[in-house]
Image (cartoon, helix red, strand yellow):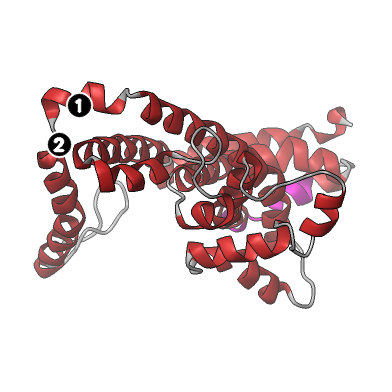
Amino acid sequence: MGPTKGGGYHGIPPWIYAIAAAGGLLVLLPLAAMAARVNWPQFIPLVTSESSLTALGLSLRTSAASTALCIVFGVPLALVLARARFPGQRLLRAFVLLPLVLPPVVGGIALLYTFGRQGLLGRSLEAAGIQIAFSTTAVVLAQTFVALPFLVVSLEGALRTAGGRYEAMAATLGARPTTVLRRVTVPLVLPGLASGAVLSFARSLGEFGATLTFAGSLEGVTRTLPLEIYLQRETDADAAVALSLVLVAVAVTVVGLTYRRPGEQGRRSAPAGSTGAARPERAR
């Protein structure tokens, strides 16, 4: 089979489909088994209990806060990694992406020895009357630590794919670097930034190990939905399964929002970049 009408090549060997189906079943079967285990007649009461709603609300609030921090710190990091050239750049990228492969509990220990009462910064903060460990702030920091690489990876990839021709054109027309960033670069990679932010939110929502190690499990303060599921598993299996299904549904919805067809993303981003590049002089 040759190229298709849309220009893609779909000459996939039949055995690839068989392996792909097995891989899909490896993911779908456990989820189907969990759904079959749900006590559907009691589903609504189980997921709307006071402790469940409190944990869900805390998870949504802290995930939103950590996503905002990921954007604040992740956008500059991605820009530096994608556009700048300096010694040690590969090492910086390795450290920024380290939480992707690091066990979350290790990240929690690192945060604890940084912001804990006897930590590197925690001692000074404690002297100033600021306690971070085992607080809601600790939850946000733990989620930011594990979710930041998702935004950096998505945005850096979008920046490299977009190239620098529009920024260069805007600079030759006299636009200042900040104007180029605001009027050209950000609109150009906005789909990648949105995808990275949504993925960071989803990762924050499912964070468990670093949160438990660094923030503990205090109801209404640090007990997020994953921690509530873990505790319910020991006392009420039906509640744990029902809450797990809620978390899966939210995660699937969030991840689904990040999907863009390559052609569609290109159509959306190119006009934004060209439009921004055509008018930098007026934006100063």
One can see residue 191 in this view: yes
Q: Which label sits on residue 275?
A: none
Amino acid on which the number 1 mark rests in the picture: Phe
Range covered by the magenta-colored residues? 160-169
Q: Kindly state the secondary structure of the residue where label 1 is placed.
A: helix
Q: Nearer the viewer, residue 10 or 94?
A: 94
Residue sitting at x 47%, y 57%:
209
Q: Is residue 186 above or below residue 148?
A: above
Q: Is residue 161 magenta?
A: yes
Q: Is residue 86 left or right of residue 31?
A: right
Relative to 12, is 263 above or below? Answer: above
Which quadrant of the figure contains the N terminus? Answer: bottom left
Question: Residue beneath label 2, please?
Answer: 38
The residue beneath circle 1 is 43
Residue 28 in the figure: left or right of residue 152: left
Question: Do the residues under discs 2 and 1 have CB atoms within 8 angstroms?
Answer: yes
Kindly identify the residue that appears in the image at 64 percent across and 55 percent down: 163
- Depth check: give the residue in front, 32 or 222: 222
Q: Is residue 36 left or right of residue 176?
A: left
Q: Which kind of residue does numbered mark 2 sit on?
A: Val
Q: Residues within 10 Å of mark 1 (few under 14, many from 20)?
A: some
Which corner quadrant of the image does residue 10 belong to? bottom left
Residue 127 location, x and y as percent? 86, 51
